[in-house]
């Protein structure tokens, strides 16, 4: 199987993006895998610090390995939004393919210092593991929003600056960069998220010279995704949309089967709804729409 870096290079050449989907249980993984299998496209599984504590890093590695070796799927595992070197070390030792070290809330120079330390450690252990850095704060929770998260970079003057992106890459040597370009974690219940700054994405990609990662993809308009990919986004994170689909599907199943107590008999509706979300996103990101 090709390395994640090779997959990203191919995606950039073809003008598509790789979908990144977070999991905390096997049901969500099954839904994502089903969509990836149906479309025969690569995808990335992510576990945040909280999710990895629930599902366990070693279990996540084993499950993704099974999808590769026994189901023939092209998929990768990312340690998403890790905030300490100690937890980065756990992900590396467990066998993750990539790590996002998130120091986006720190002042610029402190972010560089902390991220550089992580890169040096990871590459000394396994140079094939990709390290992603985050530059700019976009909130920190995959949930339904009532307001833009406090401190999130939404105004143009607060977005990641191309010159800082270049300096960040040069001094940290990260493989991937997650900028703040109008994106936020979470999604609004009855309205789309704010528009992305497509021109800023293009400027950052030209300055940084590394693949860009769009976090907070849930709730973003389809056309913004298309423009963002054209401007240089290589990976797109989706989490809140999947969580919302799980909740809705489970509630529907419980209402329709009030006396059922077997978990596997109740989870089917949620699986179908999550699979549909992932399927639609993968089609869009890979330009497979009719």
Image: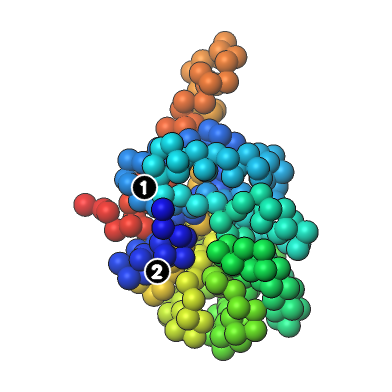
The answer to whether residue 221 shows anywhere in this view is: no
**Mark 2 near mark 1, Cβ–Cβ under 8 Å?**
no
The mark nearer the N terminus, 2 or 1, is: 2
Q: In this rendered view, identify the residue nearer to me: 30 or 150.
A: 30
Question: Under tag 1, what secondary structure?
Answer: helix
User: Which residue extends farthest bottom?
Assistant: 163
- Please say if 248 is above or below 280: above
| Residue at the spot 45% in from the left edge and 41% down from the top edge | 69
Q: In this rendered view, identify the residue nearer to me: 233 or 76.
A: 76
| Residue at the spot 69% in from the left edge and 76% down from the top edge | 116
User: Which residue extends farthest left?
Assistant: 290
Question: Under tag 2, what secondary structure?
Answer: helix
- Please say if 108 is above or below 95: below
Q: Position of residue 279 (x, y in %)?
A: 37, 45
Q: How many marks?
A: 2
Occupied quadrant, residue 36: top left
Cα gap from disc 2 to disc 1, whole angstroms: 23 Å
Q: Position of residue 20 (x, y in %)?
A: 49, 54
| Residue at the spot 32% in from the left edge and 45% down from the top edge | 39
Q: Position of residue 288 (x, y in %)?
A: 27, 54
Label 2: which residue?
A: 9
- Please say if 247 is above or below 45: above
Residue 160 shown left or right of residue 66 in the figure: right
| Residue at the spot 39% in from the left edge and 42% down from the top edge | 72
Q: Residues within 10 Å of mark 2 (few under 14, many from 20)?
A: some
Q: Position of residue 246 (x, y in %)?
A: 53, 36
The answer to whether residue 127 shows anywhere in this view is: yes
Label 1: which residue?
A: 280
């Amino acid at each position: 199987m090709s390395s994640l870096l090779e997959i990203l290079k191919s995606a950039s050449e073809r003008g598509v993006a790789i979908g990144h989907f977070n999991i905390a249980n096997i049901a969500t993984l099954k839904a994502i895998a089903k969509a990836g299998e149906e479309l025969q496209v690569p995808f990335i599984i992510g576990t945040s610090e909280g999710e990895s504590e629930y599902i366990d890093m070693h279990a996540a590695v084993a499950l993704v390995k099974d999808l590769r070796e026994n189901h023939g799927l092209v998929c990768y595992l990312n340690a998403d939004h890790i905030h300490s070197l100690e937890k980065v070390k756990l992900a590396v030792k467990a066998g993750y393919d990539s790590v996002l070290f998130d120091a986006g809330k720190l002042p610029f120079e402190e972010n560089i210092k902390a991220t550089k330390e992580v890169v040096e450690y990871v590459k000394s252990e396994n140079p094939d593991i990709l390290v992603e850095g985050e530059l700019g704060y976009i909130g920190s929770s995959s949930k339904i929003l009532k307001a833009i998260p406090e401190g999130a970079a939404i105004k143009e003057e607060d977005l990641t600056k191309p010159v800082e992106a270049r300096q960040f890459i040069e001094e940290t040597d990260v493989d991937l960069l997650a900028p703040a370009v109008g994106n936020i974690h979470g999604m609004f219940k009855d309205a789309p998220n704010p528009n992305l700054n497509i021109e800023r994405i293009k400027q950052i990609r030209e300055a940084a010279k590394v693949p860009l990662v769009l976090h907070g993809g849930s709730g973003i308009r389809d056309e913004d995704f298309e423009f963002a990919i054209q401007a240089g986004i290589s990976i797109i994170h989706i989490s809140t949309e999947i969580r919302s689909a799980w909740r809705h599907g489970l509630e529907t199943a419980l209402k329709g089967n009030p006396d059922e107590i077997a978990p596997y008999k109740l989870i089917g509706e949620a699986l179908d709804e999550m699979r549909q979300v992932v399927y639609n996103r993968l089609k869009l990101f890979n330009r497979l729409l009719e």
